[in-house]
Image: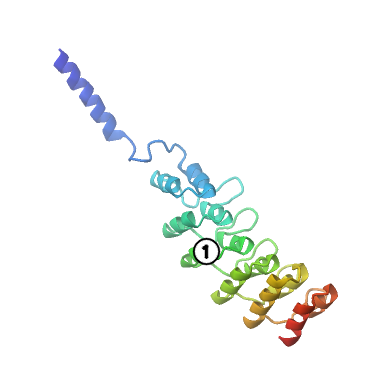
Amino acid sequence: MRELLLVAVAVVILAIGCTSAPAGTAHVTDPDGELLRAAAAGDAEAAVRALGAGADIEARDDRGRTPLLLAAAADHVEVARLLVARGADPDALDAQHDTPWLVTGVTGSVEMLEALLPADPDLTIVNRFGGVSVIPAAERGHVDYVRRVVETGIDVNHVNRLGWTALLEAVILGDGGEAHQEIVRILLAAGADPSIADSDGVTALQHARAKGHDEIAALLEAG
């Protein structure tokens, strides 16, 4: 009788083992949610587990953000590289009309820019202001980002819905300090046209003079 009981227990254990989830995924009850959380937290191991459990790499949170967008916004480069390698879309738009690529212009992360380039992002997609990534980067004084992104072939003379190019934005919203001076130099060297005026017909040079940004005015006069 004891032998029969042991055999019965062994059969049950074997059956459970045959139907259990793969190692590392048994406790992932919400793969999509887990992937989104892992991307936002920068937890590459958790992201791998979620993907292994069947998570949709293009899952969306309540704001329409994908895992790659969450990773890009928080500058979690390791997770972004993982997602890009698995085929994540760098052009997926969220509810605010941001994409993983576009937010790099806001964060100014060159490392994230490099992580996304292998996914061949569309450099012409615009944010809710109608701008490409170089425009917010120029405004925010992200020198290294601007220096790198102008090498990608992005349109440095793109005009957003406010009527501003990256050059105009650097002058109008910048503080006139060394970072924005360097950005003006980079943009001019990359082919930015200083004669493009804003929607009121005011050029970057005129804005620089009006704001008392003498160093930038001198750069624009020479450019």
The quarter of the picture where the C terminus appears is: bottom right
Above or below — where is 135 with respect to 203? above
Q: Quadrant of residue 104?
A: bottom right
Give the percent coordinates (x, y) of residue 63.
Answer: 61, 48
Disc 1: which residue: 111
Horizontal side of residue 51 vs 186, given as left or right: left
Horizontal and vertical percent position of residue 15: 25, 29
Q: How many marks?
A: 1
Check disc 1 and give the amino acid type. Glu
Front position in the image: 51 or 73: 73
Task: Let me know if residue 16 appears in the view.
Answer: yes
Q: Is residue 81 above or below residue 195?
A: above
Residue found at x 20% / y 21%: 8
| Residue at the farthest top position | 1
Left or right of 70: which side holds 172?
A: right
Badge 1, how many Cα within 10 Å: few under 14, some, many 20+?
A: some
